[in-house]
Image (tube, coloured by chain):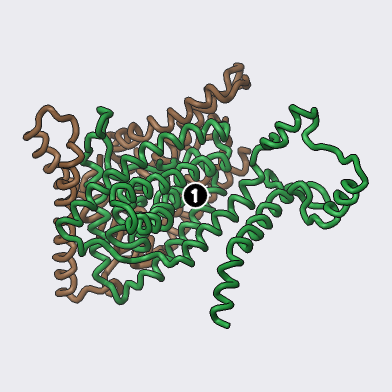
Amino acid sequence: MIDAHTSSTQTQRHDVHPLSMLIITFTYIFVVASFHSYAFIEMMPLSLYPITMIVFYRLSVRHIKNVLLASLPFIIVIGGSQLFFINERISFLHWHIEAGWLALATLVVKNTLAILAATVLLLTTPIEQLAGALLSLRIPRFLVVQLLLTYRYIFLFLEEAKRLRQAYMLRAPHHRAIQLSVWGSLVGHLLLRTFERAERVYEAMTLRRFSIQRMHIKIKRWTMKEMIYTYVTVMLFIVYRLVVI
Amino acid sequence: MHMSDALISPAVGLAMWGVTASVASYSLKKLNIETDEKKLPLMGVLGAFVFAAQMINFAIPGTGSSGHLGGGLLLAALLGPHAAFLTLTVVLFIQALFFADGGLLAFGCNVFNLGFYTCFIAYPLYKRLIRRTNIWFASIIAAVVGLQLGAFSVVVQTLLSGKVELPFTTFTLFMQPIHLAIGIVEGMATAAVISFVIKAKPELLTTTDTPMNRLIGTLGLLALTIGGIFSSIASSKPDGLEWSIFHTAGTDELHVTTTLHTMLERLQQSLSLLPDYNLKSGNVSIGWLDLGTSISGIFGTFIVAIAIMAPYIIKKWRKEA
């Protein structure tokens, strides 16, 4: 779904301050989540924010589509249950419709908007800058360094897991999945290699006199322009929410 | 079991962020990273390992379907509960942000449901069980307990948020059996990897224990939450005894007939602090929270806790004397 460079490629689109992006995204999701179960129409204007960001920063529509599709099955199952549990009709625009359908549609829109906002944050903010923003929000340095380390190794390990699975499937073409007895030792070997890798990483870090406190994480300066931009955007969301009850 | 932002209200989301931040802060303090800096790369790399291990599906015996490792219990067995909780926090953050698996507002709920129960309830249980039974039994029971508690929390958090219309019983009956099956699969997968590690490199498995008083504290907090908050949303239908009395006598409470009964009833009414699980002054509600029932729940929890702890406290006091 994502590759190692999704959030770290330096292009012109990475000019939004990471702290601004973080605050705006959280406020946006907070506002979206606060709407009631039938606020289908009321939430529509909120789609302007992610759409504007996607168009303005020319974000990857393919990636966004993949993320959205992955999240749909769960929300459709939960939303679909509303058709059975809500047995009333509701007036929607000029029609009287089943309230369950409106609740389902609202849930899908809510989910789509929340995921779009999170994806816009991911695609406009490199992980290193996001780490800097988390530090300026007083998130413990230990957790931030751990986030960077985990993110760094995910792609290496995913590649390794893919190779492991492929190697097994080539040797056992009629198996749809790995047998549990074999799986234990396959994943166990991956785990042992993980520990060896952690040892090597630790030694390399020690040799370079690494310490959590000394690790350089760049915290971008928050300029007045960016502060005003954040304030105005956040206020727009809040005022809209207060006006549309 | 990852919750999405669409299902929860801001109040529940923020409250769970607060709870998760407190547990993370406690875990950071307990970890003492200054003296054990080696754990940092290990935690980072093991977090990435969990992602990779989830990619490799295995066949579930006798079903024709496949499952994958969740990883929480395995992380706790390898790193100890505090480091495992922090690693899971980071893993879930990456899943929410990069894989849209669970939302950012729901992040606190997800860490609590998947991390807290696994590391601080399931893992100590696993440690106790493994002394008496084998790895497979201990892993399956611990994973099932962790996932059942997590699934029940999902039900409670969703219903407290009020964003979807789902009857408590139906939702619980839907979630718990599914997660029973998932728990068994998770336990089997964890046991398979731990069995391999025990044969290949047993020193990798941690010996960190969760102190018993912490465990009691956690369970006490859970009991208070259930007694204080969830008692308000408990069923208003009569209990089994009241139901049978109603069907035999036509009323759910028998009325007194003799002088002795009347005297005893008066005495009970004057002594009872919270008659019928409610305040003497009558029913007071704040929103959906029934104050009388909640206070009765908390009071009852304290009384039961004191009754259970009393023999131990007296024994300890006599030993010290």
The residue to which callout 1 is attached is: A27
Q: Position of residue B130 (x, y in %)?
A: 32, 56
Q: Position of residue B147 (x, y in %)?
A: 41, 45
Disc 1 is placed on an element classified as: helix
Q: Is residue B33 left or right of residue A109?
A: left
Q: Residue at x 32, y 72 (%)?
A: B33
Q: Residue at x 22, y 50 (%)?
A: B193
Q: Which chain is brown?
A: A
Query: Is residue A90 at least partly visible in the picture?
Result: yes
Q: Which chain is green?
A: B
Q: Is residue A210 left or right of residue A230?
A: left
Question: Which amino acid type is shown beneath numbered disc 1?
Answer: Thr
Q: Quadrant of residue B245?
A: top right
Q: Is residue A139 left or right of residue A198?
A: right
Q: Is residue B126 left or right of residue B312?
A: left
Give the number of marks.
1
Q: Nearer the viewer, residue B15 or B299?
A: B299
| Vertical order, B196 against B320 (above or below) | above
Q: Nearer the viewer, residue B300 or A85?
A: B300
Q: Position of residue B111 (x, y in %)?
A: 42, 52
* Residue farthest toward the right in the current orientation of the protein: B259
Q: Chain of mark 1?
A: A
